Structures are given as structure tokens and as C-alpha cells.
Amino acid sequence: QGQPVAASTGGIGAGSPLLAALHDDPGLRRRLIAVLGASSALGDHLVANPDQWTVLRTESDGLAPTADGRLDLTGEGNPVAVLRRAYRLALLRVAAADLTGGRGLEQTMAALSALADATLTAAYAIAVTELPEGAREPRLGVVAMGKCGGGELNYVSDVDVIFVAAEDDDLAAATTVATRLIHICGLVAWPVDAALRPEGNRGPLVRTLASHLAYYRRWARTWEFQALLKARPAAGDLALGREWINELAPLLWHAAERPEAVEDVRAMRRKIIDNIPAKEQEREIKRGPGGLRDIEFAVQLLQLVHGRGDESLRAPGTIPTLRALVTGGYVGRADGEALLRGYRFLRGVEHRLQLQGLRRTHTVPTEPGALRWLAAALGYTATPGRSAVEEFRAEWVTHATEVRRLHAKLLYRPLLESVARVPADGLRLTPEAARNRLEILGFADPAGALRHLQALTGGVSRTAAIQRTLLPVLLSEFADAPEPDRGLLNYRQVSDSLGSTPWYLRLLRDSGPVARRLARVLSSSRYVADLLSREPESLRLLAEESELTPRPREVLGDGFAAAAARHTDPVEAIRAVRALRRRELLR
């Protein structure tokens, strides 16, 4: 840092406790040097408070600020000043554990979120004690939203919250407490942002539970339901906060069924990108193309659509939800791993950028010295022919490109609108729900159709999981055909033949309108089912509109001649021509 820790009873000097401790304790030495090297802001704090290095003597345990999840507020003086000191000491411990490998990314995000909860709780308690003498403490829940609600907070961020009071009689005192809580947290740690509440900053800071429900039932827009995905009780009356979440859950898990819902999420993502200054767009690791928002929006849209029928997708955090989407077959394994790697990389960059000056930023610097510092802080070193900065840039471009590609693939997956139109009960495919849905859709033999569904979706295999995501949509397609039962039977036969083929179900899930087109042709033609079992690669024709146009006579002639010419054995030549003929018939 180029500046010594101030000489004092805890600073550097002859016989200082710090020098002796650094000599005797390699763990302290490692943690202190890591903090001073990565954060000028925390270094300045230790210069101003030279006795606080002692908090780094022991390695931080667990994810909470203290064993009971609360901050140590013992000490004399103004309660807000005591809280500020406790917050900064806890942040020092979190940073030291992060920088020395004591915590991975997920643990660091969880620890920062727990620290936010503890800070909100302490600020709430201070605000309550400041109420006028004789005033009744209100029932007020503080619900964490955004990254804090998802347990994935970064070092410097607004903490998004929504305040909910129990009854009208609580509103006046609750508003006083909420206002004071916001002020205290701003003095101690970070701004509290309550703009996600109904009507935003134009609406009252605190509403009753009943008022919230009335608003969400009538007025809430898609993005407001999207925000509820990360809601979590954080401080105040936790039971009331949990009741608020539980009451809103049925509305949240039906929000994707509104006709405009899927396009609303897509439009919101485009709007965010459009609002980034052009000169910063390529350097923005949060909002820019290939940034964190691309991952979060793709995950949240899949969560809104598929979480209606699959409760395993209802986790508040991005990483656990993405893992659940992969496990459930909604996202391919390779795609899911690529998004996880991209998310970890981008959040790691964000953490190092913010930790340096404890300043809210998501923009990679352009100044050479700052770039060299960032690359070193992230652990990059020079390799033959490439500097550490070039190594960092190369990995950044790789992750951003892959994240952008997968964002487009998942967020604009055509199947999403079809799934969103299926009622939530139709997504669960339990025997009773499936039988009812089959009868409603007009299947002549619901019992027989149910047996096909159970054969396709039974068990815990990945194949069965992907079939469970596809079949609710396919059933609607079969129902629109002349013979729904025949379409389902043909689909089962094709799936039995191709289900173990690695690309088959991936093609249906990921590649445009293939699944719906396949359902349509299988419901209309037994011959098509036979052609597909004989020539499974022909299924790829359904992925592209241009492939569905029959070929001119001269093109066919050339193709048949070329297919025959590739074989010297007449029998093999005839087989090749027949295969080409089957493919053209399917086309």
C-alpha cells in the first residue's frame, strides 16, 4: 500500500504487538497481506483503526458474521458508530477468508448476504429503540430482494428490500422504523433501496400485507413477479415476511401464463442493454452483452415458466436454480456448465473490482495500470508470448461470447411460449392430473394414453426428465390433430427407437420448432413414424424452414447419382438411394 500502519499500541514500532504477531502467526501474516494487497479501502481503514488487525488473527468460520448470525455490538458510544465498526470488522473477516482461499465464491456471496441480514437486523433494533416512549413496536417484516434475497450479494451493492406491515394500526410506527433503518444502513454500510415495492418510489414505503396482495392481484407487471423469485425474509418480523412470500407465491407461479409474460422478460433485458452508455457497453460485466444479467434473465425466465410445475426450480439463487434446471433436463449439461463457469468468472471479476476501493462498479478499467492490478488480483500471470492482462482478456472474451450465445439460445427458445400457455396443473403430469388433461384434450383412450406417458416419463433418468418438459406441450399439439391417440403412440415408438440417441431429445428441447412440427406430422401420418425409425437423421430437417421445401427434379437426380456412386457394391448403392428417397419423402 505504500503506507505503514499507524504507530500506536497496535501499530508498527519497537516491540509492537503487530510485528510480534506477524512473526509468530503465518495465518495472520497471509490474511493481512492479502487484504492490504487487494483493497486500498480496507487498508486505509486499518491505518485509521490500527488496533483492528487483531480481527484477522483467526480464520473466519461459518458463513454468518458470528456464531448466532448477529454482529457483536458490545462497546460504548453511539449505537450507529458501534454498528459501523462491527460491520467493517465483519467485512474484513469475509474479505480475508475470500482472498486466502478460506471461502469459495458461493460461500463468499452467502457470507456477504448473511452480513447484510445482520446489519439490517441491528439497524432495525436501533430504529425500534428510538421510537417515542410508550409507542408500540409495530409488526414489520423486512424482505430482502435482488442479490441479497438470493443469497448472492457482492461486496458493494444497494440492498433491495420491501417493507410489509401486519395491519393498518402498524403503518405509522412501521414507516418511522423503516425510514430510520434506511438512514442507519446508509451511514453504516450501503444504501437500502426500496424501489421494488408496489408503485416504486411513488408508492408508500410501507404497506400492509392485505394492501400488497391487492396490488399484486390487480396491478403487478411481469418484472415485479420476476423480482419475487429472490424474495427472502431478512429482518424485523421474520414470520410476517414469510407469510407475505407464501401469500404471493400462487400469483408468482401463475405469472408466466399471462400472454405477454415471456416477451416482457425479453423486452426488459433488451431495455437494460439499450440504457448502457455506448462507450461502456463492452466493458460492463453486469449489464452488458455476455454479462451477469444475460445469465440471470435466462435462468429467471426458465424458472418462471417451468417452476410452475416443478418446485425444485423455486430456489432464490442463480447457481442453485441453474443446477436444478440442468438436473431437471430443462438446460443441457454442457450449456449449464458453461453458464456456471461464466457466472463464477464474472462474479469473481466483480468482487475484485469492488473490493479494491469498496466502490460500486461493474466496469472493467481501461487504464493499463488498473488492468494489470485487476489481472494480478484475479491470479493471472504472464505466459510465453502473452501478458497477464492478455490472459485475463482472452478468458473474459471466451466467457462473454459463450454467455451471450447461451442467453440467446435459452431466452429465445421457441418452446417457452408453448410451455407458458399450458396451465400449471398440466405441467405436473401426475397420474390424476394427466388423466384429467388427456380427457379435456380429447384423447379417445385416456387410460392407454396415460400408459404411454408413464412409459416415457417414468423413473429418474435424464431422458425421462426431458420428456417431462416436452410432453405437456406435445399433448396440446396431438390434441389439435385428427387422431391424438395415434400421434402419442407414434411419438412413443419414435422415442423408444431414438431415445438413447444423444442428440434426439436435445434437438426437441433446444432447436426451434422441431418438437411441435414432429408432433404435428406424427399425428397425421403413420408413414412418417416408420420413415423416422428407418432414417432417424431426417428428423433434423424439421429444425429449418428452408429444409422443408421439396427439392427440384434436377437436384434430386444429382443427389441420387452421387449417393449411388459412393458405393461399388450394388446392394449398398441401392440402400443409399433408398435412404435418400426416404429423407425426401419425409421432407
Image (tube, grey):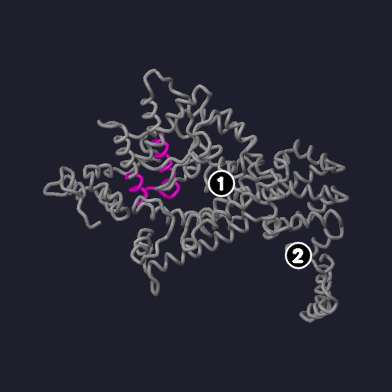
Q: Quadrant of the C terminus?
A: bottom right
Q: Residue furthest top?
A: 134
| 168, above or below 85, in the image | above
Q: Is residue 117 magenta?
A: yes
- Within 10 Å of disc 2 (Cα), the crowding (few <14, some 14-19, many 20+) is few
Residue 545 marker: 2
Which residue is more in the foreground, 198 or 383? 198
The image quadrant of residue 83 is top left
The image quadrant of residue 251 is top right
Q: Judge left or right: residue 121 versus residue 317.
A: left
At 50% from the left and 41% from the top, the residue drawn is 195
Q: Is residue 414 magenta?
A: no
Q: Which residues are magenta?
A: 92-120
> Which element carries disc 2, helix, strand or loop?
helix
> Residue 497: x and y, percent?
76, 57
> Residue 160: x and y, percent?
47, 41
Could you tell me the amino acid type at mark 1?
A: Thr
Could you tell me the amino acid type at mark 2?
A: Glu
| 347, above or below 446, in the image | below
Q: Say which residue label 1 marks.
A: 321
Using the numbered discs, state the Cα–Cα distance from disc 1 to disc 2 in whole angstroms.
Answer: 33 Å
The mark nearer the N terminus, 1 or 2, is 1
Q: Judge left or right: residue 477 versus residue 462.
A: right
The image quadrant of residue 221 is top right
Q: Judge left or right: residue 568 versus residue 187.
A: right
Say whether marks 1 and 2 touch (CB < 8 Å).
Answer: no
Q: Quadrant of the N terminus?
A: bottom left
